[in-house]
Amino acid sequence: MNAEKHADFAVPNILKSVTTNHLKPARLGIGIVSAGKVGAVLGAALRSAGHAIVGVRAESDASAERAENLLPGIPVLPTEQIIERSELVLLAVPDDALQPVIEGIAAGGMVSPGQLFVHTSGRHGAGVFKPLTEQGAIGLAVHPAMTFTGLSLDVQRLNGASFAVTGPAPFIPIAQALVVEMGGEPVHIAEADRALYHAALAHAANHLVTIMGQSQQALASIGVEDPSHYLGPLVRAALDNALAAGETALTGPVIRGDSGTVTEHLRALREYAEQENMRDIADSYAELVKSTAKRAHNRGLLNDEQLGRVESTLTEHTSFMDTTVPAPQTRSSRHD
């Protein structure tokens, strides 16, 4: 595709078709770099919306299989050919790989004026596209607040999911319209807020997985045969309540100011840490008790005396842990 033809198509026609009501944007030729779990799923969703997927990069066997399953009939191509064929290039690569990929595209002189580039990184905004926008491209950040398996069921999960969109104001409607076409709900996130935005999502979703793993491990150690089944109803109810009512849904010993129960919990976790020679569960529990107590106190749900008792318990616990179960030493990165 030559630059003149691309420039004539990309900006004017797309903007003519996008309205504040999120009507369909122009049907685009979209290339996907690459067919990871996110890229393949979003590509399938955009294809279902009527866009033409012109090519996909798939370097690993797993990516190639995913592309075949979710994007049947779409050619697997190198990045250069994908960019040459595309009005919109979807960069669905890991956060740390995004900058090098963009710099490589810019260095290769592959960009056409007015060509759209969209990345799916949570951490980055549109500023990461500077090497491409200096060559006349348009850069948009579109991040789905969703976890992906890389299977077809993920396409349905996009319905109602929130997407963070960031980019130059004149082109935000393009990102919003694409999100709506995939069944999502666009939410504008400022460039300067992307890191905090992504940290909030990682804290909620990724750390939840860690907490569940720790809890299941502790239950398995005392003979509970199916810890996930045992925890399932409780955790689902707690999550639903938290999403509906926020921190007013909090229950348990901390919010009751029951420092005796917290003390007994920490004692049991210390014993477990000594037996297993690992302290991560006890450390996580103590830090979350501390955070929970302080947030409850700030909201007036714990009085000063109750907070003091909880904090005293935590101080004793930390002192004991440091003398009986030392934290693991960080391995040296030096090569002798």
Image: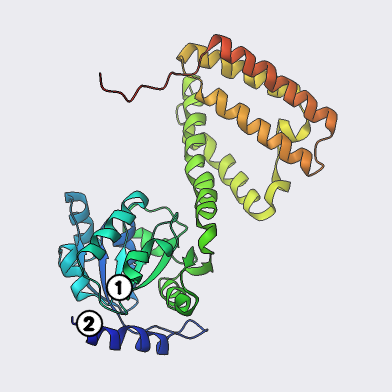
User: Would residue 133 be found to the left or right of residue 300 on screen?
Assistant: left
Q: Return the residue found at the far top.
A: 324
Q: Which mark is residue 215?
A: none
Residue 20 picture location, percent across and down: 52, 84
Question: How many numbered tags mark residues here?
Answer: 2
Residue type at mark 2 is: Ala
| Above or below 145: residue 165 | below
Q: Mark 2, mark 1: which one is toward the viewer?
A: 1
The residue that mark 1 highlights is 135
Where is residue 106? Give x, y as percent: 26, 65
Q: Residue 136, relative to residue 107: is it above or below?
A: below
The colour scheme used here is: rainbow
Residue at (84, 28) in percent of width and height: 305
State left or right for residue 147 relative to residue 9.
right
- Identify residue for label 2: 3
Residue at image position (40%, 64%) is 156
Look at the image and tell me in which quarter the N terminus lies.
Answer: bottom left
Q: Residue at x 37, y 65 (%)?
A: 130
Tell me the SS state at disc 1: loop
Looking at the picture, how far across and down is residue 162, in whole percent? 50, 63
